[in-house]
Every structure is written in structure tokens, then in C-alpha cells.
Image (tube, rainbow, N blue to C red):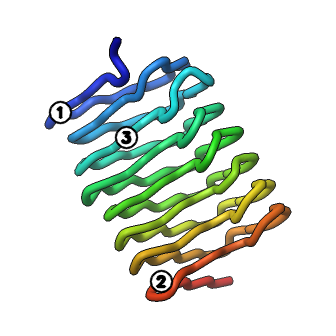
Amino acid sequence: KRYYESVHGGKVTFENLTIHPTVQLYVEGDITLKNCIFDGMMSNVFISLNNGQASIENCHFIGAKDVAVTLSNNSNAIFENCTFKNNGKSHLLLENSTTELINCELLKCRHAIWVRSESTVKTKNSKIHHHSGTQIIVQGYSTYMDVESAIENGDGNGIYATEHSNIQLTR
């Protein structure tokens, strides 16, 4: 039984697709997603980016069992005008990676963003709301930076940061 599909060392582009993943898309390389919808409760993780680059624009990530997108091992992703909704534990999980979210909406999950192990997340003009736990968790020498986003209406903490973490909020 296969638990993931993989892309190694190359470039892949998905445009104008609705995808109901039953397995994880594992990427070691470059991926571009434009105008795509990832929708379904069959996969624990929609996309795992490992030591890769991602450009993601106008996409929707809805209903992953655990995490919509994971970034690890020096991965870098830029999300523009994306929506994350009704994913299980977290919309985004980063370890030793960097991401930027511009004009995105993250809602209805346990945690919006979990940043750990020397990772960096930048949000700009995004809306982060209605999460059942802490909306943003920053741990392990990681950084969370925001410019003019709204973090509101959560059931838990807005932002939780452990020792040696860096938080920068700008209006």
C-alpha cells in the first residue's frame, strides 16, 4: 500500500486542478501550484516539502487529517492568496525551513501555524482566526514576523512562544 507520491530533484507544476489526495505528495525539488484545490479527509498530510522550493498561489487546502503542508530541511515556500480551512492539527508545520504567507486566510483548525527548529514564518496582510488551540506556536530558536495581519477569534492563545524564540509584530 502506498502512503505517498514523490517528486525528487526536479520541477513540477500543477495549475487549475482539484485534487482529492489519498496519499501525501512528497517533494524534494521545486513545486509550483496555481489555482489548485486540495480537498479531502483521506490524507494525513497533503504536501511534504523536504529541502525544496515552493511557489503557491491562489490555492485552497481543505480537510487534511493532520497537517495541510509540512516544510522541512531548509525548504522555502511562498503562499499568496491561499486559504487553509478545516485541517486537523495544523495548517502549516515548519522544521528548519522558511515560509511567507501574503494575503492568506487560515481558519478552523487546532493550530494555524507551528514553527519549530530554527524556522522562520512571515505573514503579511493575512487573516488567522477561529482555531481551537493556540493559533501560532513558535519554538526552538524560531522566528515569527507579521505585518498588518489579523490574529483573532481563537479559543486558545493567539501566539505562544518558548524561550529563545523571536516574535515581531508590525502595524
Image height of 52 relative to 141, above or below: above
Q: Residue at x 59, y 33 (%)?
A: 65
Residue nearest the viewer, comparing 38 with 95: 95
Disc 1 residue type? His
**90 over 138 or under it: above or below:** above
Alpha carbon distance from label 3 to label 2 = 24 Å
Q: Which residue is mark 1?
A: 8
* CA separation in Å, label 2 and label 1: 32 Å
Crowd around label 2: few <14 · some 14–19 · many ≥20 (10 Å): many
Tag of residue 54:
none
Which kind of residue does numbered mark 2 sit on? Ser
Quadrant placement of the C terminus: bottom right
Give above or below for 8 relative to 140. Answer: above
User: 50 and 15: which one is in front?
Assistant: 50
The image position of residue 62, as x and y in percent, is 64, 33
Q: What residue is disc 3 on?
A: 48
Q: Earlier in the sequence, mark 3 or mark 2?
A: 3
At horizontal 80% and vertical 66% (from top left) the residue drawn is 152
13 relative to 92 in the view: left or right: left
Outermost residue, top direction? 1
Residue 108 location (% of width, % of height)? 75, 46
Q: Residue 129: image x %, image y %?
A: 77, 58
- Disc 3 to disc 2: CB gap under 8 Å: no
Residue 78 position within the rendered picture, expressed as x and y whole percent measured from the top left: 43, 54
Question: Callout 3, which amino acid?
Answer: Ser
Which numbered circle lies on residue 165?
A: 2
Circle 3 SS class: strand
For marks 3 and 1 on the same chain, the one whose residue lies earlier in the sequence: 1
Which quadrant does the N terminus fall into? top left
